[in-house]
Amino acid sequence: MSTLLHPPLPAPSLAAAESSTRTAELTWLLSSLQTTLASLKSGLEECADLLAPTEPGSTLVLSSLRSENLKGFITRVGTRITKGDIYLRLPSLPPPRGQNAYKLSLSTLPTASTIVLEQLTTTRTLINACLDVVDATRWTGDATNANFISGLLRLLHENISEAKAALKGWTDGQKAWHETPLPADTFSPPLPDTISFHLSISESSILLNVRTLETAYPVTGTNTPLSSTSFASSAAPSYTGFSLREKLAATLGVGRQVVHDEAHEIFTYKGQDVRVREKVRVESQDPSLMSAMAKLGALERCVVVWRRGLGVVMGEEGEGEEG
């Protein structure tokens, strides 16, 4: 019955029919992509708005888990940290006389250096590049050229993937904490060389690492460097009682317990070899960054689907499979 209703076409006619159908499908797909790109642009603009330097910004609470080692807040406006007060209670960082915590305050002077989150700068740059690509796809070039559209979709996918990776965490081009020390005038009073204050992005959250530092090879007058405990005992007197306990521990021959992952490493910081005495790591979820991350993930999946569909119609089934 089906053979009578749909007789098979001769081979030459079948090839011509397949080619005509593929051409019609490609024309329809390229036309529909122009409409779909409008919604993609809207999503990218929402991501750009979430990272825009809009006052009053996002104020984030910082607090160490199960301890009073670090408490405070920071305010993010776009890619910059504009305000912040951090209170530290660490054995290696005695507070000033009459105070129960060591305070770090971001300077509000117009001439002070500003903390810029390079990962957010990278993300904003890539999102703006995606918007330029969408405009180029919709308004310039040949919208009916499948190869042209395929190339632009590939570029969109790469840029969105890199923007998402920058919000997710460490990237290949990101420098380590000891390679990018903050200028002392970022804080008021200025940040001592014995403290490292490092902000970055991890899983669309603000990640703060505060480290107290000591010279890796203190001068002892001999060829034997001072131990960490010995260095601690020679530090400035503490009015919290911590330094006294360290001195007693050194006198009794009891070494300090290593409680962080960088205790046995040596870093070059501001031209000097240093060790990390103490390290506090605090994460604070940023709702705007989390929303941008989710939107970028959804946009990336959409672009992958479009690339895959276009690749199939063009006879390039392998295109767009990554991601």
Image (spheres, helix red, strand yellow):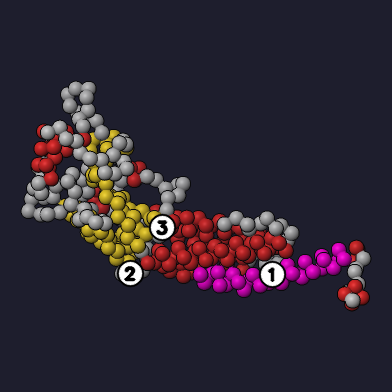
Q: Secondary structure at mark 2?
A: loop
Residue at image coords 39%, 55%: 202
Quickly name the residue at label 3.
Answer: 203
| Mark 3 nearby-residue class (10 Å; few <14, some 14–19, many ≥20) | some
**Regarding mark 1 in the picture, which secondary structure is present there?**
helix
- Mark toward the start of the polypeptide (3 vs 1): 1
Q: Earlier in the sequence, mark 2 or mark 1?
A: 1
Segment colored magenta: 14-43
For the residue marked with disc 1, what is the amino acid? Answer: Leu
**Image quadrant in which the N terminus is located:** bottom right
Residue 181, image x, y percentages? 31, 45
Distance, label 3 to label 1, CA atoms, is 35 Å
Which one is closest to the eye, mark 3 or mark 1?
Answer: 3
Within 10 angstroms of label 2, few (less than 14), some, or many (20 or more) residues?
few
Magenta: main secondary structure equals helix
In this figure, which residue is indicated by the disc labeled 2?
A: 55
